[in-house]
Image (spheres, rainbow, N blue to C red):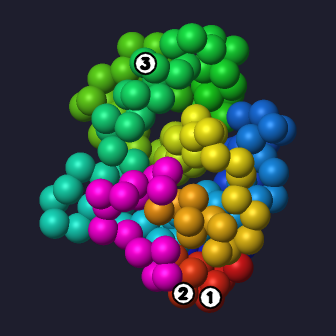
């Protein structure tokens, strides 16, 4: 596992570059908790050859959905994504599965931004505290169809936050 204070700092700085409204302490903790539960900040690729990539285990389909159904209609936010990640705008405005598979695997900041956008797009209010974050992670990020367990989130994330 990587150093958690360094991971938290990188998440905070990336979200601040995205915009202050995305960078609350609760949002930083939620993204950090997501990295802990999804990959233990250890794996770049999903175990068992699944489609999820990077520490935040984002699927390229999720990244493309963020680009096509959200950022397309919010060009200033797309510009902030470029600013936060240093990934050229062409990848955000004309997303491609192969490119996003690579970017999500190799760019921690891309994973941070897409994870934050996934939560931002939810109508749920930002979670505050580990139990609420576990619930939000399960319903928004892992979904009811996912194998994730909120109790496991609480157990794992509580070790570090």
Q: For the magenta stretch, what is the residue range?
A: 139-152
Q: CA distance from mark 3 to mark 2?
A: 35 Å
For residue 149, what is the image quadrant? bottom left
Q: Is residue 57 above or below residue 128?
A: above
Q: Are marks 2 and 1 in contact (CB under 8 Å)?
A: yes
Mark 2 crowdedness (10 Å alpha carbons): few <14, some 14-19, many ≥20: some
Q: Which residue is under mark 3?
A: 68
Q: Earlier in the sequence, mark 1 or mark 3?
A: 3
Q: Position of residue 109 (x, y in %)?
A: 57, 45
Q: Position of residue 77 (x, y in %)?
A: 66, 21
What residue sits 71% from the left and 52% below the top?
126
Q: Is 123 colored magenta in this rendering?
A: no
Q: Is residue 93 above or below residue 83?
A: above
Q: Is residue 129 above or below residue 98?
A: below
Relative placement, left or right, of 102 versus 90 is left
Q: Position of residue 57 (x, y in %)?
A: 39, 56
Q: Which residue is under mark 2?
A: 155
């Amino acid at each position: 596992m990587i150093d958690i204070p360094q991971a938290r700092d990188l998440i905070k700085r990336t979200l601040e570059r995205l915009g202050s409204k995305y960078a609350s302490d609760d949002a930083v903790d939620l993204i950090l908790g997501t990295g802990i539960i999804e990959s233990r900040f250890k794996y770049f690729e999903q175990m068992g050859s699944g489609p999820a990539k990077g520490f935040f285990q984002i699927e390229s389909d999720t990244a493309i959905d963020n680009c096509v159904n959200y950022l397309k209609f919010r060009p200033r936010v797309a510009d902030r994504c470029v600013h936060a990640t240093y990934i050229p705008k062409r990848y955000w405005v004309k997303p491609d599965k192969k490119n996003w598979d690579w970017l999500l695997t190799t760019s921690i900041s891309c994973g941070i931004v897409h994870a934050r956008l996934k939560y931002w797009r939810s109508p749920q209010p930002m979670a505050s505290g580990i139990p609420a974050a576990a619930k939000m992670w399960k319903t928004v990020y892992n979904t009811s169809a996912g194998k994730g367990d909120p109790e496991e989130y609480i157990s794992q994330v509580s070790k570090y936050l």
